[in-house]
Image (cartoon, helix red, strand yellow):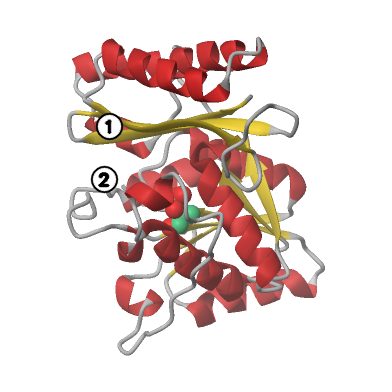
Amino acid sequence: MSSALPVVRDVPALRAEIAAWRKTGLRVGLVPTMGALHEGHLSLVQTAKEKCDRVIASLFVNPRQFAPHEDFDRYPRDEAGDSAMLAGAGCDLLYAPDRAAMYPAGFSTNVIVSDVSTPLEGEFRPHFFGGVATVVSKLLLQALPDAAYFGEKDYQQLQVIKRMTRDLDIPVEIVGCATVREHDGLAMSSRNAYLSADERRVAARLNHIMHDAIKAARGGEAITEVEAEAARHIAAAGFASVDYIAIRDAETLQPIADLSRPARILAAAWLGKTRLIDNMAV
Ligand code: PAF
């Protein structure tokens, strides 16, 4: 499939395109992705398009955010298909560097964000946020857009990126966008493509169990009780295992005793070899 969307593959070419836009005062938005695009990614492009004159999507499957035993090799890759979808959503430029352009020989820097990176995903995927923060700081500094758009589906990632951008004085507005869901409530994810038909049916239970947990917490049940009960329901629904289901402070992701501050429920659970995550405001 040939793409109507212009593509650049290195920083000088990316910056040349952006400089031409900047000369005429255009506002630029960036949507970082790892490809395998779905409606969730396209909604980020559409939101960016509403707020910016030009929108760039980056496509880079970042090896630094996968542990050796994870799915880097089998992660779905289809640049031509992604490019056509982005063009259809109104994206103006695809930035698709290869590994050597992003991490040239001798690359030795890691961006580590403490505190907000530590719980939940940080416990189960200790390599993950260092890889994300390193690549996202590079993408933001390479493009220096006015704003960058990330899905709330990866809620802890969004909080880590917000913290990093503030801490490093990166002059880019970080915008979180609502999770896009399938008709049965399953959060859209590139990894849903791994699910068998049976697993897909079970997967839809996760968001319903989270809704029930929110109701119980709002009704005054103790948070630790709500979490334990929700974990039991996830296991009973047919998930192979539960990494966590937790109600946390919505900004710091630290445990909370009550709902006196904005809170978020976050979950990660396994179906076969596929790990699903989801989250909602409480
Ligand atoms: O959310 C993702 O797709 C990735 O973690 C990101 C932000 C593009 C960094 O590789």
Residue furthest right as drawn: 25
Residue furthest bottom as drawn: 106
Q: Is residue 141 left or right of residue 135?
A: right
For the residue with label 1, is its CB less than 8 Å from the closest atom of ligand 1?
A: no
Give the alpha-carbon distance from disc 2 to disc 1, as whole Å.
9 Å
How packed is label 2: few (under 14 Cα within 10 Å), some, or many (20 or more)?
A: some
- For the residue labelled by badge 2, is the local secondary structure a helix, a strand or a loop? loop
Q: Which residue is mark 1?
A: 193
Name which residue lies at 38% across and 85% down.
108
Residue nearer the viewer, 100 or 5: 100
Name which residue lies at 43% across and 35% down.
38
Q: Which mark is residue 76?
A: 2
How packed is label 1: few (under 14 Cα within 10 Å), some, or many (20 or more)?
A: few
Q: Please name the amino acid that badge 1 sits on.
A: Ala
Is there a contact, CB below 8 Å, between mark 2 and mark 1?
A: yes
The quarter of the picture where residue 244 lies is: top left
**Residue 206 location (% of width, % of height):** 40, 19
Q: Is residue 172 left or right of residue 36?
A: right
